[in-house]
Amino acid sequence: MAEAPIRLGMVGGGGDAFIGGVHRIAARLDGHYALVAGALSATPVKARASAETLGLPRSYDSYVEMARAEADRDDGIEAVAIVTPNHVHADAAIAFLERGIHVICDKPLTSTMVDAERLAQVARSSDALFMLTHNYTGYPMIRQAREMIAAGDLGNLRLVNVEYVQDWMTGLAEGKQAEWRVDPARSGAGGSIGDIGTHAYNLACFVSGLRLDRLAADLDAFGAGRTLDDNAHVMLRWQGGAKGMLWCSQVAPGNENALRLRVYGDKGGLDWAQEEPNKLWFTPFGEPKRLLTRNGAGATTGNTAMSRVPGGHPEGYLEAFANLYTEAAHAIHAHRRGETVPGDLLFPTLQDGMEGMRFIEACVRSSSRDSAWVSP
């Protein structure tokens, strides 16, 4: 028997907000959710207008009002997507977690470690689930890379390098998307390192299975008048002896959304680029490069499980995002039935969020000490 759609709410994401639309598409794609309520803007007039445009049955002027009212309804929301600027994440998530409503939160976890610890305490004591949308972990070829490394196809890992490079803040970045990202009060202590560096770091950890031992970071703010970094170079030392580098930048002309991961061991290497997400290059040492594809020959279980159409039909960013929403739905359905959440679901959790916050904090701390080595 098919499960009834999960009643979903949304905080933020109104008007012309890019990420709100992405979350709504991702939630709709596999039919697991029905968006029924929202507090879509901190400005009540905008919130109501956005809700009317989307045809939402219920609109609220604040997430506080929404959490209280929805928890009191028999047909209230079961989960909420939080897609606000970083500084709102903690208070909004706590408002719903305290009322037993599952939370799907955009990354990074919060804007400060104090808020992260506060949120973590509530999340651990709540019966509700908490999920974080590090969406790049939802790509089929990323799941295959993770499985290949776990199976030993690369041997003992030596190098894990990752970069996430954009150019949209090279000049005078203006508009809603830039405004809050350059404001420490809303973004937090990290600029590019928090916005896209955490994605890169999470991806490297997810695929390699490694944990960070220490790092040395050099953060720069090249844009005139900026106090937050728009470029970061980070040296990484992984537990177990592997080494690596992370570069993130939003001031590198010619790069639109260039996320790339390269992992090398004593038996071979893997190379994946987000702008060609259906391809994964595998090179066993001493042999020619091999091209592995989404749902193609040699696809692993994780690859095929995350694919919707036959190989050669491109899938991309929105589908990867939807994969996380679908995994979250499987967890919520299990929770509905009073069952344990299946262990094979790989959506990012509170722990991933806390590790991302410790990474940001360590990078800022290292850079302030002339790139000293620090542990997260």
Image (cartoon, rainbow, N blue to C red):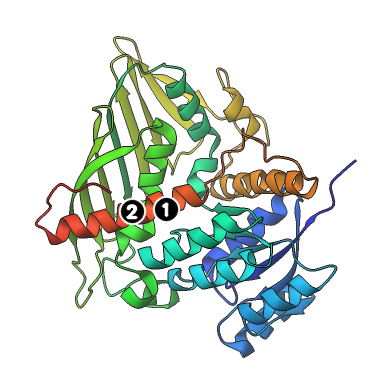
Question: Residue at left 58%, top 80%?
Answer: 41
Q: Is residue 253 visible?
A: no
SS assignment at label 1: helix
The picture places residue 112, in percent across and down from the top left corner, at 37, 67
Question: Residue at left 87%, top 43%?
Answer: 2
> Foreground residue, 19 or 108?
108
The reply to whether dot 1 and dot 2 touch (C-beta < 8 Å) is yes
Amino acid residing under circle 2:
Arg
User: Left or right: 359 with respect to 132?
Assistant: left
The picture places residue 172, in percent across and down from the top left corner, at 28, 75
Q: Residue furthest front?
A: 125
User: Left or right: 222 with respect to 165?
Assistant: left
Task: Count residues near mark 1 (Cα–Cα under 10 Å), then give few for <14, some for 14-19, many for 20+.
Answer: some
Q: Which residue is mark 1?
A: 354
> Foreground residue, 249 or 110?
110
Q: Residue furthest left?
A: 370
Residue 167 falls in image quadrant: bottom left
Amino acid residing under circle 1:
Met
The picture places residue 244, in percent across and down from the top left corner, at 24, 36
Residue 358: numbered disc: 2
User: Left or right: 246 with respect to 186?
Assistant: left
